[in-house]
Image: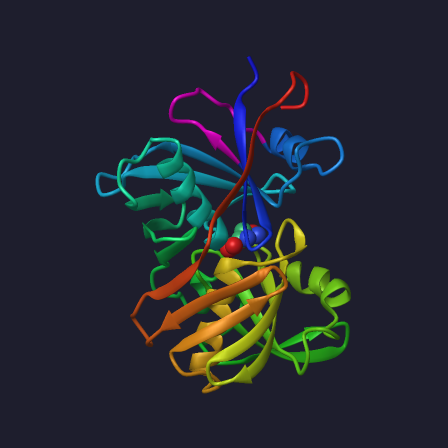
Amino acid sequence: MSPGFTKMQGLGNDFVVLDGITNQLDITPERVRRIADRRYGVGCDQVLLAEPAQAPEADFRYRIWNADGGEVEHCGNGVRCMARFLKDHGLSADGRMTLETAKGLTRVEILADDMVRVDMGPPVLTPADIPFRAAERQALYPLEVQQQVFEVAAVSMGNPHLVLRVDDVDTAPVAGLGPLLERHSDFPNRVNAGFLQVLGRDRARLRVYERGVGETLACGTGACAAVVAGVLNGWFDSRVTVDLPGGRLVIHWSGMGEPVWMTGPAVPVFEGTMAAGAE
Ligand SMILES: N[C@@H](CCC[C@H](N)C(=O)O)C(=O)O
């Protein structure tokens, strides 16, 4: 019997969510690529799998695969959708839960009107832990791409991000530069590349070329990384409204050692069952 799935989206960053708590599911990179395919499969940016918790402090564990089949550590829009999935499917009785990923623990609270608030934990800025090849921590690093040098911030939210400030996201070379940044040799695990336009001390626009996917309509960890980079560089105060192509996130970070808070929507789209051979 093919497994049921739930299609969900957070600001147009879309997910196929699978229940590995009540079903025994064997997810392989090839299977993820089939499911994520927008013509031959269901279509999504990431596949999310709910599992029983392993850590004693966690209520559930969940795993994340990019559309290219690579398993990753964290997903900001995904964690909101996963919390909503667990609650809507009666797997969690409570709207507050602690979810475990490869990155560690994330605390989530479901609010009214499809909104979810997440404690994304503190950012990681030590180059070796991002991982990023640099001798020491800096607010901006010179990064050479095809004989051109860009000033970028490097931040891990559990997954690696670079942030490049641009004058206008509408004309930023996301499609051309994104793939070169994603696979830059100074980021040994590849990187998500954020193009940030600062509108004011509490307003920004952002486009993200995601590792393993390409440009998405929104990236939650990317928005957190962009605000961290902007606070460290003196561009932002602590609370920033970030407009992405798919909609708006509110991010709050009060500085070193503090967690990054993210608030945004998580929306179910449809329930389905994959035909044999498609899953
Ligand atoms: N869309 C996500 C991030 C998903 C993982 C990312 N592509 C990676 O490879 O790290 C988000 O909302 O954070």
Residue 131 visible, this orientation: no
Which quadrant is the N terminus positioned in?
top right
Tell me: 270 left or right of 169: left
Position of residue 178 relative to residue 36, above or below, is below
Q: Out of 22 and 249, give the one closest to the viewer.
A: 249
Image spot of residue 33 (x, y percent): 66, 35
Task: Find the magenta span and give its range.
Answer: 17-28
Magenta run includes residue 165: no
Q: Out of 56 and 12, give the one closest to the viewer.
A: 12
Image spot of residue 118 (x, y percent): 36, 57
Give the residue displayed 71% in from the left and 60% down from the top: 179
Position of residue 74 relative to residue 228, above or below, is above
Outermost residue to the left: 56
Magenta run includes residue 21: yes
Which quadrant is the C terminus positioned in?
top right
Tell me: 134 left or right of 58: right
Q: Quadrant of residue 151?
A: bottom right
Tell me: 78 left or right of 239: right
Q: Quadrant of residue 125?
A: bottom left
